[in-house]
Amino acid sequence: MKIALINENSQAAKNELVYNTLKSVVEPMGHEVCNIGMLGAEDKALTYVQNGILAGILLGEGVVDFVVTGCGTGAGAMLACNSFPKVLCGLVVDPSDAYMFGQINDGNCIAMPFAKGFGWGAELNLKYCFTNLFSGERGMGYPAERREPEQRNKKILDKVKESTYRPLVDILKDIDQELLLGAIDRPTFKDLYFKNAKDSPVKEYLASILK
């Protein structure tokens, strides 16, 4: 599994901690982590809305399998990510959230609070969240006696989402182009995306506005 990490400007200073913790948990499982940023206070700023744009492109185009993102409370990043097709993002605050989101909702993105409640033991909370989320098989339902209805509900939700979103390229053309360019015009994103994305209307459009 290829996992992208994206965090916004107010929590840029915590990127290294989150990245290193995520890597330490998932790389022994055979997963790869791609750090989109922000890579520190001097990196080009990302808002939580731009986090959603990047997650929408990377997941929508199949460049990565999972996105870990966040902001001060996690709520803004979650809402932004869920604005895009093929993204199912949950708010994860603690390890039980992580486990149940993976088992019940089986999404492909989480948003975490990197300010609210981020005090003593924050790195341990991250570690246990990532462990519970990425260990073992996801989408198995929880509790065990609810397995079949939970798996059925996930399939129903996927079908509903397919009906409620427009094609990604149309969305990208219609949103504020300065906002879009500010999100994608960063080396970490361009290197990951253009090396791994298949030819598509989205790839053609992004290349055209980055010239």
Image: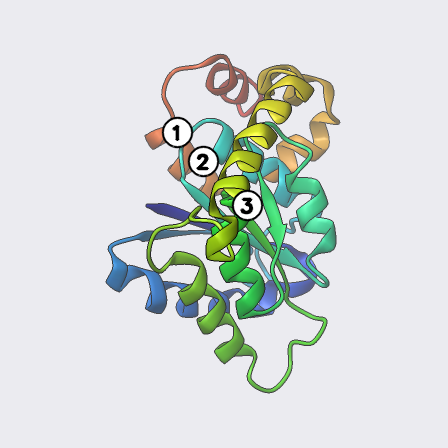
Q: Position of residue 110 (x, y in %)?
A: 56, 52
Please tell me how crowded label 1 is: few (under 14), some (14-19), or many (20+) other residues with Cα within 10 Å. Answer: some
Q: Position of residue 158 (x, y in %)?
A: 56, 29
- Which residue occupies the extreme front position in the image? 145
Decide: marks 1, 2 in contact (CB < 8 A)? yes
**Up-down relation of residue 175 to residue 70 (above or below):** above
Q: Residue at x 74, y 51 (%)?
A: 76
**Up-down relation of residue 56 to residue 210 (above or below):** below
Q: Which amino acid type corresponds to the residue marked 3 in the rendered image?
A: Asn
Please tell me how crowded label 2 is: few (under 14), some (14-19), or many (20+) other residues with Cα within 10 Å. Answer: some
Left or right relative to 174: residue 70: left
User: Mark 3 falls on what kind of element?
Assistant: helix
**Up-down relation of residue 193 to residue 146 (above or below):** above
Q: Which amino acid type corresponds to the residue marked 2 in the rendered image?
A: Lys
Q: Nearer the viewer, residue 43 or 82?
A: 82
Give how far apart the Cα atoms at labels 3 and 1 are: 30 Å
Q: Position of residue 162 (x, y in %)?
A: 59, 21
User: Mark 2 falls on what kind of element?
Assistant: helix
One can see residue 39 in this view: no
Q: Which amino acid type corresponds to the residue marked 1 in the rendered image?
A: Phe
Q: Residue at x 54, y 43 (%)?
A: 150
Left or right relative to 6: residue 173: right
Q: Nearer the viewer, residue 14 or 96?
A: 96
Q: Residue at x 46, y 26 (%)?
A: 61
Q: Nearer the viewer, residue 49 or 42?
A: 49
Mark 1, residue position: 194
**Up-down relation of residue 29 to residue 61 (above or below):** below
Q: Nearer the viewer, residue 89 or 186?
A: 89
Lower sequence index among marks 3 and 1 = 3
Mark 3, residue position: 105
Lower sequence index among marks 2 and 3 = 3
